[in-house]
Image (cartoon, rainbow, N blue to C red):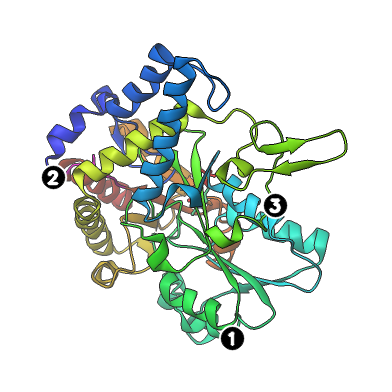
Amino acid sequence: MNIEEIRKDFPILNRGIIYMDSAATSLTPEPVLDAVLDYYRNYNANVGRGVYKLTQIASQKYEDAHKNVAKFIGTTANELIFTKNTTEGVNTVASGIGLKKGDKVVVSLWEHHSNLLPWIRAKKTLRIDLEVVKPNDAISEGDAKTQCALETSDFVDAIDKKTKIVAITHVSNALGSVLPVKEISKLCAENNALLLVDAAQSAPHLKIDVRDMGCDFLAFSGHKMLGPTGIGGLVIKEELMEELEPLTVGGGAVEDASFADYRLKQSYEKFESGTPNIAGAIGLSAAVAYLEGIGMEKVKAWEEKQGKRIIEELRELDNVEIYGYGSEAFEHGQRIGVVSFNVNGVNPTEVASRLDREAGITVRSGHHCCIPLMNYLGLGSEGTVRSSVYLYNTEAEVEKFLDLIRKISNS
Ligand SMILES: Cc1ncc(COP(=O)(O)O)c(C=O)c1O
């Protein structure tokens, strides 16, 4: 992987920044911008609703985008709907699977608010039972507590015959830790429970094979994987397409309509009423082509190398606390390059501000949309500092970041 060549595709990097906040949103390479502009410049038209040439080109490109993005995550176009983002994907499932009083929903302690609030709402409005899987009590003190480990065994008691759906993150955005979703999918199958995977943090960094994973739904966001904002995807297992109620109904989704009733299409169009984000979908398709061109294995290996260095160097600093698994977890597929930490006695927001002020390094600080997890870790809303690398970060950038953290931790 030639980082210097890759960096040429991200001219924003020439503006004196070291971008280490890709877990929040990734940078957008030139081929993605070109694809978006090409749509607006050369074949700007609505999709699926006309006979003229321009709309046919736009429709074809939009359909191709469905196919390409679906293939990227191991499925086919008929199982992928385009959404606004992961949040919309999760909400589509939470509101569409017909939850009713007494149904049980299982989530984990690691969930981002986007895969938590929709289920809390269902608890409040429909009176479902919501169970949160937390680390084993026996290891919830000291170092083990900051690791916040979750394994398949922790889910065994929670997933039972009353469970309608298990909704879990594949990778924690706050810890960088990976959940064994394939193993958990077996527990779901044994109990006839559905499985929703929040892949917002995994689809950009790991090779996803949605069929092999064994889940029923998988949600992800384009803007975290080199695509534009406002576009994401939700995989819906084909046999569930019919029973899942769409979040919205309207134009483009209907087979037939009268003043009394309507009949929805039975394809992804059922879930994409209204004019979709055509340019966004085309941009996302270019983003997955870009990632495929480099190879997800290479992307993963590069990030792991940088993530490992960050963890191992931070670990040398007496007054730095790291959250999530240690660097050995990379070897077991339990970690990605997102690193959450705190410098004792320095507010995480102050650390992030100093990184920005003194070296143009962008990292996130705060609760990372995981307030319950931060409370569990005893961090309140101050949260942590979070660095997140991607394919465009260099070793020299990581070194600069580490140098400054060393300085901050010594001052
Ligand atoms: C694990 C996880 N889930 C869900 C989301 C929500 O993504 P979006 O804001 O794109 O809907 C995020 C965003 O940070 C995330 O990291």
The crowd level at tag 3 (other Cα within 10 Å; few <14, some 14-19, many 20+) is: some
At label 3, which amino acid type do we have?
Glu
Q: Residue at x 26, y 28 (%)?
A: 10
Residue 388 sits above or below residue 206 on the image: above
Q: Which residues are magenta?
A: 389-394
Q: CA distance from mark 1 to mark 3?
A: 30 Å
At label 2, which amino acid type do we have?
Met
Residue 23 sits above or below residue 62 on the image: below
The picture places residue 34, in percent across and down from the top left corner, at: 32, 22
Q: Secondary structure at mark 1?
A: loop
Q: Residue at x 65, y 51 (%)?
A: 91
Pointer 1 residue Cβ closer than 8 Å to ligand 1? no
Q: Secondary structure at mark 3?
A: loop
Looking at marks 1 and 3 on the same chain, the residue that comes earlier in the sequence is marked by 1
- Position of residue 303 in the picture relative to residue 93 (left or right): left
The picture places residue 290, in percent across and down from the top left corner, at: 26, 38
In the rendered image, which quarter is residue 126 located in? bottom right
Where is mark 2, residue-wise? 1
Where is mark 3, residue-wise? 245
